Image (cartoon, rainbow, N blue to C red):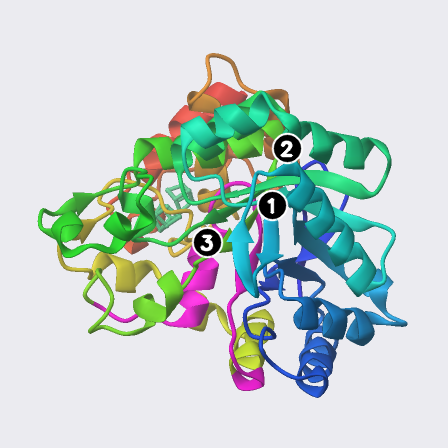
Amino acid sequence: MDYRELGRTGLYVSEIGSGCEGMVGKDEAFVRAYVDALEEGGVNCIDLYAPNPDFRSYLGKALEGRREKFILQAHLCSVWKDGQYKRSRNMDEVRAGFEDELRRLGCDTLEIGMIHYVDSLADWDEIAGGDVLKYAESLKKQGIIRAVGLSSHNPEAALAAVRSGAVDVLMFSVNPCYDLQPGNENIELLWADESYEKPLLNMDPERQELYETCQEKRVGITVMKAFGGGDLLDASLSPAGVALSPYQCIRYALDRPAVASVLAGAHTLEELKKSIGYASASEEEKDYAEAFAAMPKISWKGHCMYCGHCAPCPKGIDVAAVTKFLNLAEAKSSVPETVREHYAVLPHKAGECIACGACEKRCPFEVPAVENMRRAAELFRS
Ligand code: SF4
Ligand code: SF4
């Protein structure tokens, strides 16, 4: 398993993380077996959006004696009310819900306190000027949580939160179909037939800006919905019209700027082990480039996906990484220091490009890679 720095938190999370829906509604023995499989596979990041009391208690027991091996992403506004899940901004409920979580998990501290499910700008504005954010910040100040997070499906709301500097971690829905669509408060529209009637071209600019702003501000992204709720794995359900493999979806999400961990949704131990298998899968199994290039009505022509399909370069240049840094730098009026630092540690720089064109021939998206190398060499002066 590989691990990535989660933005500015100082935490290192496994590239494959875990959602919790697979443990909810199961008995104590199953939750223990699930946590055993996570530990065995080196998965250290678990999202805890579900407030179900039994689940929290069983997980607390399963973590006894190994709590320090896991990074827990708790959700502050996900509460249990009248025997069911409820999203709440009522501070009495929010406080009681979080205290219940700590008690049932048997923890004094949690790594991430996520402000749960902020899918509209109006909701974020209310949170930013109100008690929910103050509560999250006070938990961080007291050391009860290490990082403040926010979960969202809407790039507009997420971008405002990231720009505010108040959130350290973003949990966001990332998959190739959502990424083509403009944000909407109604997430059902992201999957609706009418949204795919016309050909879709390239990444939605606001989503691209969100990923790039996260990278610039060192806000780590943990990914939900990487498989589109499973639909992307089935040609008859996928809006893209072709079936992708779980590894292709995971790799696509991991290639977006600032993404640190993909929280795989698994309902059985077999599904979980399959996702963990990503860590030892071959490059061919993870490669999504040709499958994406063949999607009907969806095109990324000319847009670098950071997929690495164009490797190897005879001069050893990592074309995907150079292009990612180029795009991050060109989105700003001057090159951000963090981008310059990342570029500086690349073993081979764009200036070494001999314009042989081999990368362009292998790129399924017709990206002008030689021109990109020329611009990067000029911008980074190496
Ligand atoms: S240039 Fe093409 S093949 Fe290379 S990383 Fe970009 S999209 Fe992928
Ligand atoms: S064109 Fe430049 S970057 Fe592309 S393979 Fe040739 S040397 Fe490498």
Which residue carries the number 3 mark? 253
Cβ atoms under marks 1 and 2 closer than 8 Å: yes
Horizontal relation, residue 12 to residue 187: left or right: right
Q: Nearer the viewer, mark 2 or mark 3?
A: 2
Quadrant where the C terminus sits is top right
Which residue carries the number 1 mark? 77
Which residue is outermost to the right? 65
Identify the magenta region: 242-270
Label 2, label 3: how far apart the Cα atoms are: 29 Å
Q: Where is residue 364 in the image (x, y as percent from the top left)?
A: 26, 54
Horizontal relation, residue 70 to residue 356: left or right: right
Examine the rendering and report whether any part of residue 327 can be seen.
no
Q: Nearer the viewer, residue 123 or 41?
A: 123
Q: How many marks?
A: 3
Q: Which of marks 1 and 3 is in front?
A: 1
Q: Position of residue 297 (x, y in %)?
A: 13, 54
Horizontal relation, residue 304 to residue 328: left or right: left
Q: Which mark is residue 132?
A: 2
SS at mark 2 in the image: helix
Any magenta on residue 134? Answer: no
In this view, 286 is above or below 214: below
In this view, 96 is above or below 288: above
SS at mark 3 in the image: helix
Circle 3: residue type:
Ala
Nearer the N terminus, badge 1 or badge 3? Answer: 1
